[in-house]
Image: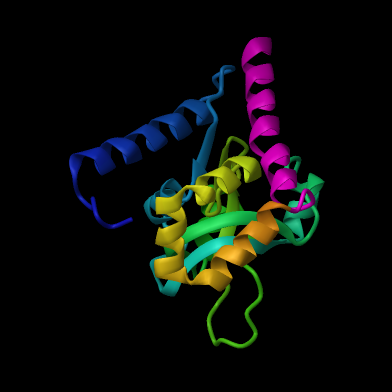
Amino acid sequence: PYDGEGKAWEKNFFSLIDDIQAHNANGNPREKYVFAICHSFQLLARHLQLGNVCKRNSTAFGVFNIHKTEIARNDKYFRNLPTPFYGVDSRDWQLIEVDMDQLVEKDAVVLALEKRRDHVPYERAVMAMRVGKHIYMTQFHPEADAQGMLHYFQMPEKKEHVLKHHGDWKLAEMILHLEDPQKLPLTHDALIPAFLRDAKKELTLN
């Protein structure tokens, strides 16, 4: 998330977010919605100063269990997911050391944390947040489609890439998770479709 630090595209992205928040804060009946994923999650976290966006000790790649916070149990989208639920994660960066003062100022809440890793002395990274009523942001990929990913990893060049960089055990683990209808499909169906339905409904009403 620092590759473009200070460059025009990043400034434009941050300006867009500021404009959206200002638009919503002014009581405009046609409020605007944002769903930020992965890299844009990290950019938003840095722009809003929500915590420490830093490099991970090692790359996260695969389908992992993700744990909801207590707040998420009452969130209109996350409450429909089990805990833990499963999501696709592929990243070298993370959000840790959340700034509680900034969360209060920005009306932000943490909705999910990464899997528990009791064997390592690292803080669990934030995997999902809500900022105000209209901005949702996830470090994982809720748009990931299990069947599409299974097809993707059956392509010889993609399969070889995973084997080379992550090993045969990681590929086997991913395929096992992707074939489970109680894992990725639940996440895929619960979050983005409901978010888009609500956004469309509110815009239509106003």
Measured as percent of width and height from the top left, residue 105 is found at 52, 52
Total number of numbered discs in the rendering: 0
Residue at the limit of the structure toward the left, as seen here: 7
Q: Looking at the image, which residue is at 69% across and 26% down?
A: 198
Q: Does residue 130 show up magenta in the picture?
A: no
Q: Does residue 200 show up magenta in the picture?
A: yes
Measured as percent of width and height from the top left, residue 87 is found at 63, 54
Whether residue 111 can be seen here: no
**Considering depth in this image, is 159 or 4 the residue closer to the camera?**
159
Q: Looking at the image, which residue is at 43% across and 75% down?
A: 58
Quadrant in the rendering for residue 127: bottom right
Task: Judge from the rendering whether residue 120 lies leftward or rightward of residue 23; answer left or right.
Answer: right
Quadrant in the rendering for residue 148: top right
Quadrant in the rendering for residue 82: bottom right
Task: Judge from the rendering whether residue 147 lies leftward or rightward of residue 19; answer left or right.
Answer: right
On screen, 45 above or below 119? above
**Considering depth in this image, is 78 or 70 the residue closer to the camera?**
78
**Considering depth in this image, is 9 or 163 the residue closer to the camera?**
163
On screen, 21 above or below 157? above
Q: Looking at the image, which residue is at 63% across and 66% down?
A: 173
Whether residue 37 can be seen here: yes
Task: Judge from the rendering whether residue 128 lies leftward or rightward of residue 36; answer left or right.
Answer: right
The quadrant of the picture occupied by the C terminus is: top right
Q: Looking at the image, which residue is at 28% across and 35% down?
A: 12
**Considering depth in this image, is 87 or 83 the residue closer to the camera?**
87
Measured as percent of width and height from the top left, residue 115 is found at 65, 70
Q: Which residues are magenta?
A: 180-205
